[in-house]
Image (cartoon, coloured by chain):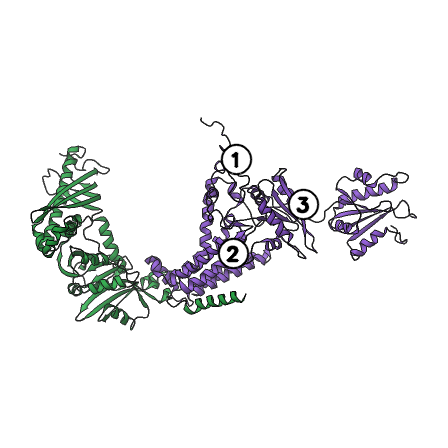
Amino acid sequence: MKRWSRALCALTACCLLSGCWDRRELNELGITAATAIDRSGDEWVVTYQVIVPSAMWSGAGGSGGATSSSQSSVHVFTSRGSTIREAANRANLEFTRQLYFSHTDVLVLGKAAAQQGITEVLDLYLRSFDARETVLLTVTDGEGSKILRQFVPPERLPGTAIATILKTDQETSGLTPTVRVFDVARSIYSDANAILVPEIGIRRVDGGDPKDLEGVDAFKTSIVPTKLRLLRTGVFKGARLVGWIGQRESYGINWLTNRIKNTMIIFPCPGAKSDKERAAYRVRTAKTRVAPVKSGQSFQMNVRVKSKGVLIESSCTKSLSDPATIAAMEQQIEKVIQDDIRLGWNASQQMNADLAGFADIVHRKYPDAWKQMKNDWDQRLDQIELNVHVQATLENTGMLSDTVREKPS
Amino acid sequence: MHASEKLAEPAIVDKLRRRLGGSSDFIVRLFHEDAKEHCKYAVCYIDGLVDKTLLAFMIEAVAAETREEAGKQMDLAKSLASRVPVGSLTDTDSEDKFVEAVLNGEAVIIGTALSGGLTVAIPGGPSRSVEEPSSQTVVRGPKDGFTESLSDNVSLVRRRLRTPDLRIEDRVFGRYTRTKVAVVYIEGIIQPVILEELRRRLDAIDIDGILESGYIEELIQETSWTPFPTVQNTERPDTVAGHLLEGHAAVLVDGTPFALILPVTFFKFFLSSEDYYQRHDIASFVRIIRFIAFFVSLLLPSLYIAVTTFQQEMIPTTMLISLAAQREGVPLPALLEALLMELTFEVIREAGIRMPRVIGPAISIVGALVLGQAAVQAGLVSGAMVIIVSFTAIANFVIPALGMSAAIRIMRFLLMALAGSFGLFGVLAGMIPLLLHLVALRSFGVPYMLPVAPLKWINFKDLFFRLPWRALTERPAVIGSRNIRRQRKQGPRREGNRN
């Protein structure tokens, strides 16, 4: 009995003395939805978009009702420091809650910080327990803190909304790549050493003032003067931003890197008499394979693209019930994809950045040749020839076969 | 009758009266041929322990015997046997046996002409009729439940198992209560080892009173240091019959409708007799629900505490925000909040059992409105916590056996304390010893976690799922492995089976 009571005492002491040391109640947490990192002189400027839970959830407690319309659902503030963690620590000089980064959806890099290099950011995100390396990365042409101040009506959480925009684009059109912090870290250690990061920016509608979207009033109108939007794509070599490419180019590179899952392709009708005759093809599945072939001192990249999809819009005059038309359409689609890929690759060559990740493929297939080439790989990109072969399949034409049009008079 | 004249009684009657201390319910009726003569017969019984109608028959028979007896020297026993319509007659002569017989609800006939006495078993007295069991109700299945009368209970079981192999062993326990206890089993199915062990443990009982089968349960169970029941109790005769067929033994106790079933394994507590009456697919679904309810009941509050105070990163963002919003302004830490609500529920529950039926609705209003809604609106507890606690409480009622659900309730509190101190690590640190404890437990030598540890695949046919009866051709292993087959191997032949 004595032994038992002693063991019990020890157990109770364990619970009471050592327990709870890292306990955090939910109402002590400052849940950060988005973070922006800027550079100002020698200091890191970190901006946090902290969720205000009571404004998010209207049924809270007795205060209930429509609190949500009068209270801002996020609180944005900034702190500075010589390191990012120092800045985060200093945030508690002015903020009541512990900043909590596990639920951060998106990280916005300011232009200055991105150009200066983000190795510190990568280290932080990979090292710490609560900040996740799965956070989506975007870059902005200006200060990141300004992006965080913008609301994205009707979403109540701007940070989550940015992440949703990125993911939706990836899933439905693939115009811009979706990049996680982890992907950037991996690219630094890869042979290609280059990666694309989508740019987010503020687009003015009718010359609106970006300040208009900063308050709760953004939810009170049906049209907003400015919008957050995915614009160009930032080219990172190593951990540094070196330039920008347009959306069409990044789309081509997405094809090259097998990132396209679901997209839409507009193509001119076979035998079209005017520009008006166009059709839209929705890609349901797509697969890209790249195989390098050594030719002399350079390489030929055999790119094979297979895609399957359906017709979703058409103004073509030829009858779609004719298999020959379908085959012709497939050829048109193949041509459009081929052009996109070439456009993307040209951009990559111009930037002298191996955005398609050919270096790793070459390294794997020709390890010996790679050893000689790896030092001036980026200069050799110009000599690489692209051999694109696309096989597009049009699986069905939708619920209608022939195009709707007026009776020829 | 003859109040004025003191009649001579047989000496033994006086002794009996003194043994019983002149208790007022000890009745002696004297019979004589005529007023002057000596007492011919005396009938002794305890009022309330005998059946009044049968007693009347018997007294009439004895009176007739007294009148007609002049001249004839016939044996009273034979004579009574022909006259008294019911009750077994026994010749007895010692005083102790008379006392025992009288206390057992028998009438004792003592005659001056007889060497000893006769006892006639005419037990009766107040008893409840067979009703639907109150604690284990089913939708489909027999509606009769055990009563407080042992003989009724035995008959309810016997009626379901009309086999000569059904054995009923009577025993008497309690120095003062002299409670009749019947051990019931099916010879040829039960493992003799288990039966011997049961007999050995029953023999060791020496107690002044047994008022309910719970006494015996505690006295014969393997260890008292576990919250988990190692003996099952039931009010349902069909449950007893079903278990007997699987090689278990049952202990019926006079004075209580709760019969004991043993040995029993952990998983047995999640089965209901209804599982076997319903279609197998529906029964299997319900069983899965019960096992889910088990985990919910055991773990939900502790997981909630652990995740909201330590491992917030495990909650999806939108849910986290909604939970955080509800916790805005709640003064207590999540652990205390949960303990407060759980204790409140336990109090309401206990009050609900004890209180008179009339006050029932009042308690539900207080419980539901005041403690649920008002506590949330007053900002004392968060809405999510009320949902967690109520769901846990409801899930706890899904488990068919009350003993098991009580054990889970206690374990839940321990796990909550651990979760509040150490988070998910604490929950794990609580679950591992719990599992070790369960694996180490035994019920009459049978491992508590039987079909799982040690692994017996054959029992899985009727565990998490109940396979159709055609597939259940064998009795569960170990417990009933003496007579393994319960159906022909092919199963019953179907009419119109294509061949």
Percent across and percent down for residue A79 are 24, 70
Q: Mark 2 lies on which chain?
A: B
Specify the quadrant that holds the C terminus of chain B: top left
Dividing the picture into quarters, in which one does residue A99 lie? bottom left
Q: How far apart are marks 2 and 3 (CA)?
A: 32 Å
**To which residue does mark 3 refer?**
B151
Please name the amino acid that badge 2 sits on: Ala
Dividing the picture into quarters, in which one does residue A162 lie? bottom left
Q: Residue at x 48, y 58 (%)?
A: B411
Left or right, A259 with reference to B389: left
Q: Do tag 2 and tag 1 residues touch (Cβ < 8 Å)?
A: no
Front residue of B454/A173: it is B454
Percent across and percent down for residue A255 are 17, 48
Instruction: Report which colour depicts chain A.
Output: green
**To which residue does mark 2 refer?**
B407
Q: Mark 3 lies on which chain?
A: B
Residue B487's tag is: 1
Instruction: Report which colour depicts chain B.
Output: purple
Q: Which chain carries label 1?
A: B
